[in-house]
Image (cartoon, rainbow, N blue to C red):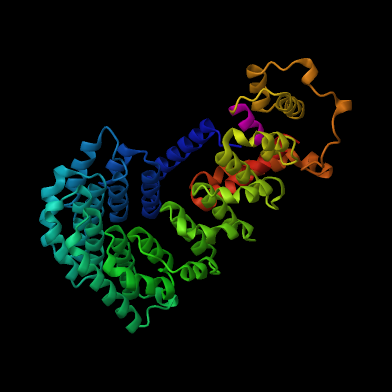
Amino acid sequence: MRPDPVENDNLRQREVESQILALHSPAAHIRASAARRLGDLQAGMADLIECLQDPAESVRSAAAMSLGRFEADERRQEIIEMLLAAIDDPSERVCQSAIRSLGMLRAETARDEIEALLDETDPFILGSAILALARIGASDLAPRIAGYLQDESSYVKTQAARAMALLKYMPAREVITSLLEKTREERRSRGFEDPSARGDRRESDLYNLQNQLIRAAGDLQITEAVTILIDIAQKDIGFRGLAVEALIAIGADIDPQLLVGLLADPSIFLRKRLIQLITKYNYLPALTLIRPLVHEENITVRAAALQAIVRLKDATALPRIRWMCYHDSNPFIRVQAVHSLAEMLGAGAVQDMIGLAGDANYQVRRTAITYLLEWKQQDPQTLEAFARYIDDYPEDALSIEIPSQYPLPDNTRIKNEDRAPASFPLLPDELREEAGSMLNNLQRWHDELLRAPSPERQAVSSALALLMDILRNR
């Protein structure tokens, strides 16, 4: 079931009102949290502007950072002026947030004020100014900004590396490659390559620097960095996926054995990320390595592999996709497989959709009916499938829509005595009396997940939506 846009809008509005109310809390940390959340929601701009005068620097900083999210707002110029004023805030933390937001807003009118901060001695103010200028697009300052790749501060060097990538400043290629080698060696010499050392502030700085240097190598397609990137992909835990992404972006030839090893890694996150990267860059040489993963036991990896072979238009995988539609052990993967088959074959999948239109899985069945409607099928088999669906789910939105498009003759409707034996109910009989209370609890859980969307929460909310559909159609 797709989320109800009206319901989601109502939930969002309630949360906005709740966060605006929290801005008046006597506790500074609650006000600061509310200011950050309003930025995520891109709401409450006038209230956030007022927060720039809050006595607590944590609140002013959070408000300044959140205002950078309002790029498309009609009051954008007013926001820029308020952020320019916030640069003079006595708190360096607030000043840094204001500079970063001006960069996010690509405030060209603030360029002169931000450029003046390149002479700052505070590394956080300087680093924020470097990144803001890059976001504004100050390409004429690229040579000067490149000089900060040699700065003593890891934070400043990190922001300079990001700036080089944003400004596409190719003359910095050799310096970035050299700095990547030195940073990696420094982490190793200090014993920081062990992930357990991540709590050390020095390691955190070096880790962030190496992260940005790898990204810059990919963005600038630095071929000179290929050798070290391959070594990182093989050995550096925490950077392997990122290094592969950079190698793919550069267009380097990657040893298949390297990808085989990474795609067999115990880390589900790494494997999913690699599959997504291969798809993103249309890296066809890796297709033969992804195909076997549609047999993978882990659901997350299996779903990612299925999505990849569809995006990469792997026609040889069609038999497996068709099998998954009918037989995959996971009900959500089956629905994904139905969508995948339709995306691959279009109306050529009509016979499969007719077959799936009588499936025991409600979501599989509904998806198949939706495609048959979309493809405007009117053959007797399809009309019979429509009639069955209307009889089984008379209150479903599709059951109301179907007769408006297809006035089904009486003889296409299936009489109860002619109906095939019903498949086992998805909701056991002994639980039917409790369906109402279960539905209410699932709805509360579902609504709470929508308050702070994330890939993990979206996956769970989708599962809850399926369960709620089953309860509603018990």
Residue at 65% x, 33% y is 350
In this view, the residue in front, 349 or 2, is: 349
Point out residue 67 in the picture as x, y percentages from the top left corner. 29, 44
Q: Quadrant of residue 338?
A: top right
Question: Which residue of the protein is positioned furthest toward the front in this rendering?
Answer: 316
Q: How many marks?
A: 0
Type of secondary structure dominating the magenta stretch = helix
Q: Looking at this view, is 242 or 85 the one in front?
A: 242
Above or below — where is 1 with respect to 159?
above
Task: State whether residue 17 is above or below residue 26.
Answer: above
Image-quadrant location for residue 368? top right
Residue 373 within the segment the image draws in magenta: yes
* Image quadrant where one finds the N terminus: top right
Q: Residue furthest right?
A: 417
Left or right? Give the position of 427 relative to 306. right
The answer, for residue 284, to whether it is visible in the render is yes
Whether residue 328 appears in magenta in the rendering, the answer is no
Image coordinates of residue 292 in percent, x first then y, are 59, 60
Q: Position of residue 282 (x, y in %)?
A: 43, 52
Q: Viewed as shown, does residue 278 lie left or right of 163?
A: right
- Is 379 above or below relative to 53? above
The magenta region covers 368-374
Q: Depth check: 363 or 324 in front?
A: 324
The residue depicted at 42 percent of the width and 76 percent of the height is 235
Which corner quadrant holds the C terminus? top right
Residue 91 visible in rendering: no
Q: Position of residue 254 (x, y in %)?
A: 41, 66
